[in-house]
């Protein structure tokens, strides 16, 4: 078996088959064909793993192959998500000088207004759920949508291609800075292939235009500067990552102990210890202030009481009303049904995130995060805790922990990125979306199994590349 994997013809065949499968999946398999979609998706993961295990594939090869796979999708409309219609809507509003945070597409349509080119087509494409809620995409994401409007103000396809180029460039940036971080940590450079050659990343981010690719780029770049103790530029880049999507804010507490990176025994006197600790605390406070300042600066042009009200209500919906592909929440929901007889999301949707935040706080407080390798693992598990307790886990939510897993010896996120396709069972009936919890249960059974296996200290495979 090892001989077959390492033979060059096997690698060429794997690349050719992967290219064919990307073309097949993106052009001929709609998301409601669940079994066909899942089969091709898992085959792509098997081929991706084969490429990563080959001795013939090095860093430069990963970059070239990953870019080729992404370019195969360059000229097609997203087929697994309709969110891009809202991206284009927001970008065209902004291009016309209209703040996208103060109105919903439904309000415009009900008022008989067509504020942007192809407004009716965009409205129908985004779906009623998206159309009736205020946008929750921060300003840096909106800037990407504005660039798409700049080049494709009259064409949906041109807007899509523009956004796709931005996201491909962002992934290339993640690859470059990911290599730099791996060198700092003395980990194999091929680990970045777990992200860059990952079919989930290629299909969900490049293919379906989710801007988590941009968020991952700024996050990884910020990590490089933070690990080199360049707090201000690291904070600026981290702040930009937050302003693409808000989720990286969850990781800020985990950095605290990294700033307090010396032990008492390192100092000649108690006075010198306290002097250093004051400086370290000041650096951490500066880091946090920079992140907050960057985000305030980006939101400043849009700031108003209506913005605060609309944006907070839109974000709050994800915890109080929406539920999708959850794990521990579904267990809590079932228990709530047994006790009360109704869906307790209004309570559990707030309680579980609070428990997750408390868990992240404990991880930040008691883990020895002053070490670079420990810090990266803590960041990985902090975000994993959030995903396990939240009410909604869309596939692209795995982007942050997946890229963080490249800087560790854990591979359960790679497994999760493969199994996340089972969440697409909800689309089997295009006219009546219904989530089959047996498929969700299988997804999390495999994920928890991989996690427990890797947490077992006897598992030597945890420490192999990649």
Image (cartoon, rainbow, N blue to C red):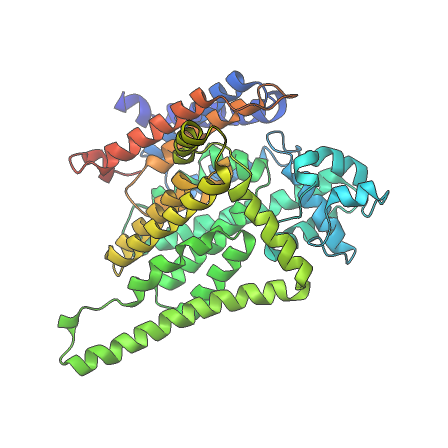
Numbered-mark total? 0
Which quarter of the picture shows residue 56? Answer: top left
Residue at image location 78% in from the left, 47% down from the top: 153
In this image, 408 relative to 422: left or right? left
Of the pair 105 and 96, the residue shown nearer to us = 105
Q: Is residue 173 visible?
A: no
Identify whether 218 is placed above or below 356.
below
Residue at image location 23% in from the left, 40% down from the top: 463
Residue at image location 25% in from the left, 36% down from the top: 454
Identify whether 203 is placed above or below 182.
above
- Residue 195's x, y, as percent? 42, 41
- Residue 247's x, y, as percent? 48, 51
Of the pair 276 and 108, the residue shown nearer to us = 108
Specify the quadrant that holds the C terminus. Answer: top left
Of the pair 392 and 288, the residue shown nearer to us = 392
Q: Can residue 442 be seen in this view?
A: yes
Identify whether 220 is placed above or below 258.
above
In this image, 455 relative to 334: left or right? left
- Residue 76's x, y, as percent? 66, 32
In this image, 73 relative to 13: left or right? right
Which quarter of the picture shows residue 1? Answer: top left
Which quarter of the picture shows residue 219? Answer: bottom left
Of the pair 176 and 286, the residue shown nearer to us = 286
- Residue 45's x, y, as percent? 42, 28
For the view shown, which residue lies furthest in the right direction? Answer: 112
For the view shown, which residue lies furthest in the front direction? Answer: 340
Identify whether 116 is placed above or below 276.
above
């Amino acid at each position: 078996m090892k001989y077959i994997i390492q033979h060059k013809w096997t690698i060429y065949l794997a690349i050719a088959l992967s290219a064919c499968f990307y073309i097949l999946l993106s052009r001929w398999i709609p998301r409601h064909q669940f079994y066909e979609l899942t089969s091709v998706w898992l085959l792509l993961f098997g081929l991706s793993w084969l490429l990563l295990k080959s001795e013939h594939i090095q860093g430069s090869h990963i970059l070239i192959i990953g870019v080729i796979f992404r370019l195969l999708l360059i000229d097609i409309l997203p087929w697994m998500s309709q969110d891009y219609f809202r991206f284009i809507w927001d970008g065209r509003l902004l291009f016309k000088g209209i703040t996208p945070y103060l109105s919903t597409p439904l309000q415009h349509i009900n008022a008989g207004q067509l504020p942007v080119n192809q407004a009716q087509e965009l409205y129908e494409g985004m779906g009623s759920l998206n159309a009736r809620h205020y946008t929750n995409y921060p300003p840096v994401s909106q800037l990407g949508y504005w660039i798409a409007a700049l080049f494709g103000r009259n064409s949906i396809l041109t807007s899509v291609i523009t956004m796709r180029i931005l996201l491909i460039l962002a992934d290339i940036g993640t690859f470059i800075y990911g290599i730099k971080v791996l060198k700092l940590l003395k980990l194999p450079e091929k680990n970045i292939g777990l992200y860059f050659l990952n079919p989930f990343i290629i299909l969900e981010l490049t293919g379906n235009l989710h801007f988590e690719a941009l968020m991952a780029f700024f996050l990884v770049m910020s990590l490089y500067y933070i690990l080199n103790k360049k707090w201000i530029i690291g904070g600026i880049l981290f702040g930009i990552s937050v302003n693409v999507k808000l989720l990286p804010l969850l990781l800020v507490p985990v950095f605290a102990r990294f700033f307090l990176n010396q032990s008492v025994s390192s100092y000649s006197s108690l006075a010198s210890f306290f002097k250093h600790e004051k400086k370290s605390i000041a650096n951490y406070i500066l880091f946090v202030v920079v992140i907050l300042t960057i985000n305030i600066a980006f939101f400043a042009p849009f700031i108003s009481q209506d913005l605060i009200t609309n944006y907070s209500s839109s974000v709050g919906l994800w915890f109080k009303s929406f539920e999708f592909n959850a794990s521990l929440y579904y267990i809590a929901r079932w228990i709530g049904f047994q006790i009360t007889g109704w869906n307790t999301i209004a309570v559990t949707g707030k309680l579980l995130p609070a428990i997750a935040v408390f868990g992240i706080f404990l991880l930040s407080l008691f883990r020895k995060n002053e070490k670079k390798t420990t810090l990266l693992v803590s960041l990985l598990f902090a975000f994993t805790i959030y995903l396990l307790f939240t009410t909604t886990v869309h596939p692209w939510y795995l982007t942050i922990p997946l890229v963080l897993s490249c800087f560790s010896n854990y591979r359960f996120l790679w497994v999760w990125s493969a199994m996340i396709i089972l969440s697409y069972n909800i689309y089997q009936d295009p006219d009546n979306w219904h989530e089959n919890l047996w498929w969700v249960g299988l997804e999390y059974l495999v994920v928890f199994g991989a996690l427990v296996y890797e947490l077992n200290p006897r598992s030597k495979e945890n420490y192999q590349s990649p």
